[in-house]
Amino acid sequence: MMPNRRRSSGFRPLPPRSKPANDDLFGNGDDDAEKGRDHLFLWTVGILLLVGMALAAWLGAFYIYGHPEKPESYRLLQKFKKVPQPKRFELTEAPPGEFLTPQKAFERYGAMTDFQLGRENEVLMRDFIRNYRSTKRLVPYLVGRYTIMSSYGLKEGDFIDSGMVAVAQSVDVPQVVIEHLYPAEKAVIPTLEQMLSSGLDLKLDRTTDLAAVIHIGRMPDGRLQFTLVPLIYGSYALAQRSESFRLEPPSILNPGGGLPVVRDQLLEDCLKRYAETIRERNAKLAAQRKDHEIPVAVPAEGTTIVQLPVPPPEQKKPEEPKETAAAEPTPAPEVAVAAATPAPTPAATPVPEPTPEKEVTAAATPARSPLLQPFLAASPTPSADASSRPQRWKTYSPGQMPRGRLVTLEDASALADRGVGGERLYLRGDFAVTASRDNRVVLRSSNSLDQAHAPVAVVEFPENSTVPSERQRFSRDGMRPFEVRDVQRRPDGRVTIYVREITTP
């Protein structure tokens, strides 16, 4: 008989089963799975870094090739021999450009802000380094006449390490200063030093010179300094001498040297020396004129300049009566003399000693000068036919003249001592006309207490313009000042400022 068995319900519990290693969906796997996922993350980071490095290298190469004017970029390109050497251009194959006069160049670049001028300098330098191969801009060439103030030898560390640089000032527009680079071999430098001397007249012509502008700097006084490089690198010579020299394109450039080459204290010393040279030259000219002049009396305060009516030269009918008793049988031109008695009508003013006969006879002699002629000279450096030529110069609307510094008659003594030095100066103040003739007048300050020793201004007006009459008073401010041309100290110590009218009414 079989033993009784307990009837089961048919459900038996299963033994516990362990979870597979790869069955954890919540990241609770074993160590091998965690290491695999760490490797994937590192590979992702590495790939991203490589992509970033490739992108940075591409952008860096684009920047280096696109900006060779930067010192760092130029050094790298030079190291890998990817920068071209400056090219000697033939006159018929020169890059297209425009020829700028000093006035036009000053008006164009003088109106730019410092930021705009910096961007323009980058483009000018970049085009020059590339030999103007990758640009559609017109190359700015500077033309005109310039006076060399000083010259210096180029040395290692400068933009060009061999040759000379001449600092010159425009003859027509004194607020334009250039530094002309002359790249040459070291053997030619002694000849360059002799030929690029102070005071030499330098002419840049569009048919023979291609002086390209590669940098524009703004000087502290508002003037512009242009750095020029001759793209032809031709031969130069003076007509009065037999020496000549030939320029050579530089084999290497140094943008890290900076432009302009002559700057800071070196430029300031150059301007001071040139001002001293001009002052000494003017003093010598004044001494020479004094030796050839006959001293004349200085009119006292309150004297009047009058015109004596006299017969015209080559009078055919001397028997006809004249309008006044001052007429003389000897023909002579009209002459301005001093009258001690003021009168409202110059023609009716009686003239005391010396008698009209003596004055007219003296005026007919070319060696003698009418009274106050030193104040009414044609210019500080008169020429033989200066009075016969019409005087023309550019005039501006009020407030539209080139930038410059305003001075007064009270500043004349200081200007005579240190010289103008090529600086653009304008005269303003309250004036009184003490003499007037043709297109020139003599002005004194209406506020001066010591009229006998006060400085005066000789104003030259354009042809066919309205000239102030004698004893007229007027004022000029910064909108309509006079342009200062020269300042001289006379042997008696008085200072004369020579100015001219440059603004329209």
Image (tube, grey):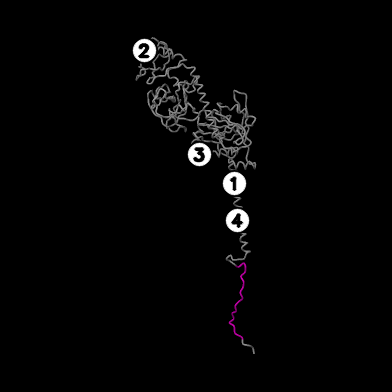
Distance from disc 3 to disc 2, alpha carbons, whole Å, reads 69 Å
How crowded is the residue under tag 4: few (<14 C-alpha within 10 Å), some, or many (20+)?
few
Compared to residue 473, the image places residue 43 above or below, namely below
Q: Nearer the viewer, residue 303 or 88?
A: 303
Q: Image quadrant for the N terminus?
A: bottom right
Residue type at tag 3: Asp
Distance from disc 3 to disc 1, alpha carbons, whole Å, reads 27 Å
Looking at the rendered structure, which numbered label has been put on residue 60?
1
- Which comes before the other along the chain, label 3 or label 2? 3
Q: Is residue 425 left or right of residue 25?
A: left
| Rendered location of residue 116, percent (x, y) | 51, 39
- Disc 2: which residue: 325
Distance from disc 4 to disc 2, alpha carbons, whole Å, reads 113 Å
Q: Is residue 498 left or right of residue 124?
A: left
Q: Closer to the observer: label 4 or label 2? A: 4
Does the residue at mark 4 contact the one at mark 2 (Cβ under 8 Å)?
no
The region drawn magenta spans 5-23
- Disc 4: which residue: 45
Residue type at tag 1: Gly
Q: Secondary structure at mark 2?
A: loop
- Is residue 20 covered in magenta? yes
- Which comes before the other along the chain, label 1 or label 2? 1
